[in-house]
Image (cartoon, rainbow, N blue to C red):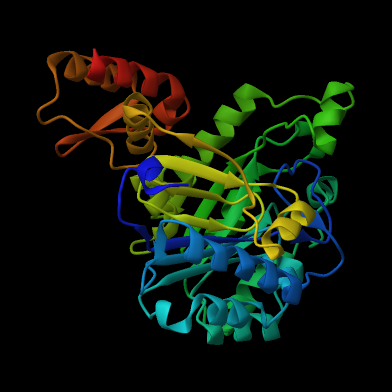
Amino acid sequence: MTGAEIGEAEPVEVASVYVHAPFCARRCTYCDFAVHVRRDGDVDEWIETVGAELCRVELSEPVRVAARLDTLYVGGGTPSLMGPTAMARLRDLLGAERIGRDTEWTAEANPESLTPALASAWREAGVNRLSIGVQTFHEPTLRWMGRLHGATGAEHAVSTARSAGFDNLSVDLIFGLPRHLGRSWRADLERVVELAPAHVSLYGLTVESGTPLGRDVALGRESPVDEEQYREEFLEAAETFTSAGYDHYEVSNFAREGARSLHNSAYWRGVPYLGLGNGAHSFLPPVRRWNVRDWTQYRGRSVRGESPEEGRERLDADARRLEEVWLRLRTDRGWPRAGAHVRVNRLLDGWIANGWAQAADSHVILTPDGWLVMDGLTVELDQASSG
């Protein structure tokens, strides 16, 4: 990559960093993430490999990691599979001076590997936000997914995290699962409200062709996603969490006051960010790039000092404008009315009349019904704004 490709002669400074931890004890039936299945995570191998990529980035590319990070996110995979020392090792690799008290440092954990020793060690290392992969509290559905924690695993994990000093907890829930599993979405929502995490993220089930679920659907052994059920469950979740005092600040995310994900919000604002690890993405405006997904291939390239990049795209003015529309509509930033062309305001008025949007101060933000048809609305608004 050259400075001309990025559009700046000077290095692009990034204050948000994502680090991928690929190891998983088992691949879930629906999972299409860049994971590497093994019984235990290898923290030595991980630190060596990510460190090699970071060294290459800092020495060879027009990217400068900020002296103080705004956000650091460790995702997976299952970061908690690598044990108690992983986050302290990562802190030392990145530079402890870059991680301050104001840095939002999130790490993902699965309930079965979030032990008291691990939670305490991660908190001491500087992690101040945990994202716990709950997905559901229904035992048969957990088994169908291939998850390793039982029905009470989530409650134990939340208790363990809080005992270690974590107040900023996020939990993940998945919706749109096959009805034959007998999972009660209402019961899952109520249990999350009872746990009272600071943040909740929703994920709608998608069927990817290369996954066990994708193969079962293709062979007729499993049903595809029921679109009406998907819609009903999304709307029920929106109503449940907003009624419980959460802000529905992004299409799939809910937060208590002061607990919005700063890292994900950086993505949604379109600011530069650096991704390290297999399958990780980086955005150095106007260039977006991504690494190879296979861990073995990524590791081989990185430790040899080669680029692990698999591909990139350079966003032209039209693509940047469309992405800006999409990013604004997916959050409660919404679309500003001040200075908008009459055709844009006419379009926004139509959305409000249809129940897809609502007026908020000088902006229009989508409602949950609007978020369900957001892709189509994005194209409409982009065309109205540029026509």
46 in relation to 265, above or below: below
Q: Nearer the viewer, residue 81 or 358?
A: 81
The quadrant holding residue 314 is top left
Q: Residue at x 74, y 77 (%)?
A: 44
Residue 293, horizontal then vertical, whole percent: 70, 47
The quadrant holding residue 205 is top right
**Quadrant housing the C terminus:** top left
Residue 340, horizontal then vertical, whole percent: 14, 24
Residue 118, horizontal then vertical, whole percent: 68, 81
Q: Residue at x 54, y 87 (%)?
A: 124
Residue 346, horizontal then vertical, whole percent: 19, 14
Q: Is residue 370 left or right of residue 213?
A: left
The quadrant holding residue 55 is bottom right
Q: Is residue 205 left or right of residue 273?
A: right
187 in relation to 49, above or below: above
317 in relation to 203, above or below: above
Q: Does the image show residue 156?
A: no
Q: Nearer the viewer, residue 53 or 340?
A: 53
Q: Does the image show residue 296?
A: yes
Q: Nearer the viewer, residue 108 or 322?
A: 322
Q: Residue at x 76, y 40 (%)?
A: 30
Q: Is residue 7 left or right of residue 166?
A: left
